Amino acid sequence: MTAEAPKSPPFADADALVVALGTRARAAAKRLAAATTGAKAAALRAAARQLRAQAPAILDANARDMAAGAAGGLGPAMLDRLRLDATRLGAIADAVEAVAALPDPVGAEIDRTERPNGLVLSRVRVPLGVVGIIYESRPNVTADAAALGLMAGNAVILRGGSEAAHSNRAIHAALAAGLSESGLPEDAVQLVPTQDRAAVGALLRAQGLIDIIIPRGGKGLVARVQDEARVPVLAHLDGINHLYIDAAADPAQAVELAVNAKMRRTGICGATETILIDRAYPAPLAIVDALVRAGCEVRGDARIAALSPHIARAEAGDWDCEYLDAIVSIATVDGLDGALAHIDAHSSHHTDAIVTEDAATAERFLSAVDSAIVMHNASTQFADGGEFGLGAEIGIATGRLHARGPVALEGLTTYKWLVRGSGQTRP
Amino acid sequence: MTAEAPKSPPFADADALVVALGTRARAAAKRLAAATTGAKAAALRAAARQLRAQAPAILDANARDMAAGAAGGLGPAMLDRLRLDATRLGAIADAVEAVAALPDPVGAEIDRTERPNGLVLSRVRVPLGVVGIIYESRPNVTADAAALGLMAGNAVILRGGSEAAHSNRAIHAALAAGLSESGLPEDAVQLVPTQDRAAVGALLRAQGLIDIIIPRGGKGLVARVQDEARVPVLAHLDGINHLYIDAAADPAQAVELAVNAKMRRTGICGATETILIDRAYPAPLAIVDALVRAGCEVRGDARIAALSPHIARAEAGDWDCEYLDAIVSIATVDGLDGALAHIDAHSSHHTDAIVTEDAATAERFLSAVDSAIVMHNASTQFADGGEFGLGAEIGIATGRLHARGPVALEGLTTYKWLVRGSGQTRP
């Protein structure tokens, strides 16, 4: 820790710190809820300019995190997530500007009805209020989450991982400078000023001060948040995603989709982890071969393993494993019903897809699979807010309440009912 | 407890009981999610027929609850909530049939977009899954909640109050007979077979088995549920509702709305509890007099209390009190900004209303008040799912997540994303 970031903040304890942060956030949220689209967009553009202007300080802070991470034994994947350079920082600033250009959800009318007694009812979107985001090593989340939260009219409290503490403080300083320039309250985006883990517990208990907590990170973080939180949580769990190759799949398309769904990027939550192949599908070997050629380790059931010496036998645990790596499990299933039964038993309800030329089978799959995203003849790697045209996302919600799938600006709002009358009394 | 309802169910403990209930509910929910609108409506009509056919048994069971309640010292208001007669039971059956006639939300398309790469995305409504409802003395909730839950494609687990245990079992038996006739799974609607309070705790901890808990009852119940629940909760808190009489209000309308908003029924959550009168409003005495004539106790601030000997002085606690009775607090405020400040400080964010002929003032109020329902020139007593045209409601949500205000069929659903492609891979 450095001088500008005291390890012991001037608060009696973590709860007192969070009360202070939450009270300031609540006051800022009131002002943000009334802010115009233009004011919010201008603030984000100013924040993007500050990110570019303060690049030297941000990259310097990041270098300190990288050095500490390397000395502390962070693995190469973690170090890569942590690392910023001029290109990556430019992309972060671009992303903030892109959010500024998105349609403002606040004030949008969801529906409107007129009752027989003349009352006119409408639902309009309003901000959620105060959003807490607890995340791990990626410093870009500091800017992304702040931008999305603010554009939806919310005050944001950010709690990043200790390995990115210097980077996060530097990015936050740039954002705060942008807000300050623009006239929106600086407290619209606050960074928890300590890495003390007790602060996370205090955030999770801050009912009334924080309206929703969004955890972004690995299983351990999400599990802790879900277990401890008294504040509602919008969680992103595993992506144990399936690609089902139906008997009626186009064989060339099946190969292309299997390789893309698994191998385009293996570490993202939309990557396919298990391929299900209909026993009646004529060309399973071509799929396996293409995956092996693409560098994928294949773990198959007995029938698949018998196809090629390159295939290991899957063990029971493979069907419930989110590899996030160049490994795939492949099971043989008996038609659509077999695929649905396997998905029902093993899917994490994130994204599941079918490949088939049979429209009726496709529609049955789309209807029967109870996952946040269900696809037909498309790569599961499309599970992404940007690819869905939402502009950006704060995460992919795998729960059932409030928002499901990619969560963007709309998911960071709620609504209120407006009732316009002319003196109606209720009989 | 009687022979047909053993005090010790055949389970090791409350958790084992809830696992059994939840597992059966989950299986039923899978079948319900695929049930057609016609099948669900037919099941509800059969349930309504059974409620009518089994009226003697239900009224007999209710008489036992009433006798036990009277002997146990339940107050007249509680006994009235508990009491069934032929008319009330007929209304319960009618309400079940009315739900059967509502538009089915399941399968409805929320939106649809086509991406430049040809992917077609749509969001369609799907059931939430398993809904747990924990409620107190009103036995009609057993039928109402079951009907709404089922029509939205959910399995329902009901846990009623011990004072209505016989009535609830008899109503549940009729519903189960209707479901059984219709071919939908009987486990679609289960009643927790014990009044052991540990069962409530087990329901609140049943993550993975229950998707949402809806408490319906007094503050003590809702507070316990919110405090203990690990399952998401859709809660209905206080209705500390305000009616603001602006300087530009029509005086005759102001009197009518004030009397209706407060006095039409004083015990419902949409009743006004505090009236705010603009210092510039010319005729506050007429409002006070009309309320007093209607039988209302008025507690005013110094200025209001000076208007009439019938007015007591309000104490500080009055501004935060949900009377649910023929009592109103009245404060003088300085125009719209004063009203907004008072509402911000004291509203429970349920329903707040303005009376004014000034359209710009009305729109400022509608925009600035952050409550689930905000009204202009209408009685707060309209805060009701039926009055909103939703057909029925499972409650009025005062939280910010998932659903807000009157929650009906749509609020008992979530959505999934469908992605229809033609072989697209992600670059």
Image (cartoon, coloured by chain):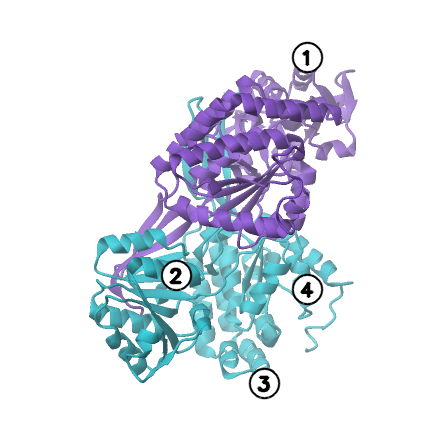
Chain colours: A cyan, B purple
Residue A214 at what x, y percent from top left? 55, 59
Real-space Cα separation, disc 1 to disc 3, in angstroms: 79 Å
| Nearer to me, A310 or A41 | A310
Tell me the kind of residue under disc 4.
Ala
SS state under label 1: helix
SS state under label 3: loop
Residue B65 at what x, y percent from top left? 66, 26
Residue A147 at what x, y percent from top left? 50, 60
Tell me the kind of residue under disc 1.
Arg
| Nearer to me, A344 or A45 | A344
Residue A298 at what x, y percent from top left? 36, 78
Q: How many marks?
A: 4
Real-space Cα separation, disc 3 to disc 4, in angstroms: 25 Å
The first of marks 3 and 2 along the sequence is 3
**Label 1 belongs to which residue?**
B293
**Outermost residue, bottom direction?**
A71
Q: Residue at x 74, y 70 (%)?
A: A8
Residue A73's mark?
Answer: 3
**Outermost residue, top direction?**
B293
